[in-house]
Image: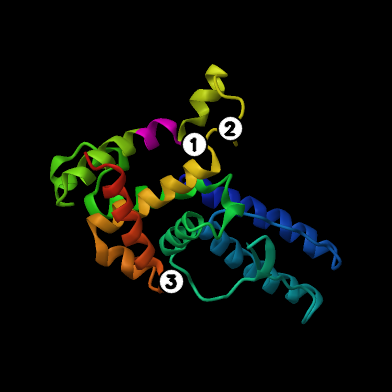
Amino acid sequence: SSFDLENRIGILSFMKSQLLKIFSNCQNGKVLIMTHDLQTFYDLEKMMKEITNAVILIFGKNSCNYCLRELSQQALVIFKEEKRNEYSTLLSTVYSFASGASKEYDIAIGNIMRRALEAFSTFEYRRGMDEISCDETILSSMGNQIYHDYFQNLMYRLILNGESHMYERIKSLSDPSFASYMTYEAKQKTAKDILCLIYLLNRAHIEAHLSSIPEAMIYIEKWCDDIIERNKI
């Protein structure tokens, strides 16, 4: 997912050529491909359709097939064919983690939260997520000084301690225990804060993307109220 478009196409083209060699010479060949990236998943699906059609021309009908699965709640389930909004999926995962329903995302949640916040800040403000925390116009739109001060401090903490800085920590050998960098409770609190931030900046936005979770707005509003209560002078 970190490759530019040219290299993504190059990698997929190379994979396709190698898989065609395997399946064109052996009907009993089997390959397992895994990815964490939804767009790459769709690209791989297109690739497998092309490979399947090519092999069928060689060996005949039903000589090649593939299946799609996703890891959900610690189990492999059938992947639904309809296209998904990856951003909505990210926000739904952040909400599930924040509410304590998806502990299996403990290791990856930092990256998921960052991707969701980056997508929101880029789409809404054409800025990086770190810039939101120092933009008075954006912070003031929340209409409450407590929120203003709270998220101004929180965002810097998220940027400085986020998993995106793992490379610098590896070079300095300052933190060999990456998985335990933040406690589960700290990650869960950060997930709640990110949802509150987006909600306070654009309620309709988060309502639309979490529309499949009826109770989400009730809990997010409660988490926003909790921020006020904890930070009253």
Mark with earlier residue (1, 3): 1
Horizontal and vertical percent position of residue 49: 63, 71
Q: Is residue 158 magenta?
A: yes
Report the front residue among 58 and 3: 3
Q: Which residue is mark 3?
A: 213
Residue 76, magenta (yes or no): no
Rendering coords of residue 24 (x, y %): 79, 64
Please determine whether, in this image, residue 43 is positioned above or below residue 146: below
* Lateral position of residue 68 relative to residue 199, left or right: right
Tag 1, which secondary structure? helix
**Labels 2 and 1 touching (C-beta < 8 A):** yes
Residue placed under numbered mark 1 in the picture: 163
Determine if residue 113 is in view.
yes
Viewer-side residue, 60 vs 233: 233
Q: In percent of the image, x 19 and y 45: which residue is there?
A: 139
Label 2 SS: loop
Left or right of residue 19, residue 121 in this image:
left
Which mark lies nearer to you, 3 or 2?
3
Label 2 to label 1: alpha-carbon separation: 8 Å
Identify the magenta region. Answer: 157-163
Q: Which circle marks residue 178 in the picture?
A: 2
Query: How far apart are the alpha carbons under marks 3 and 2?
Result: 32 Å
Quadrant into which the C terminus falls: top left
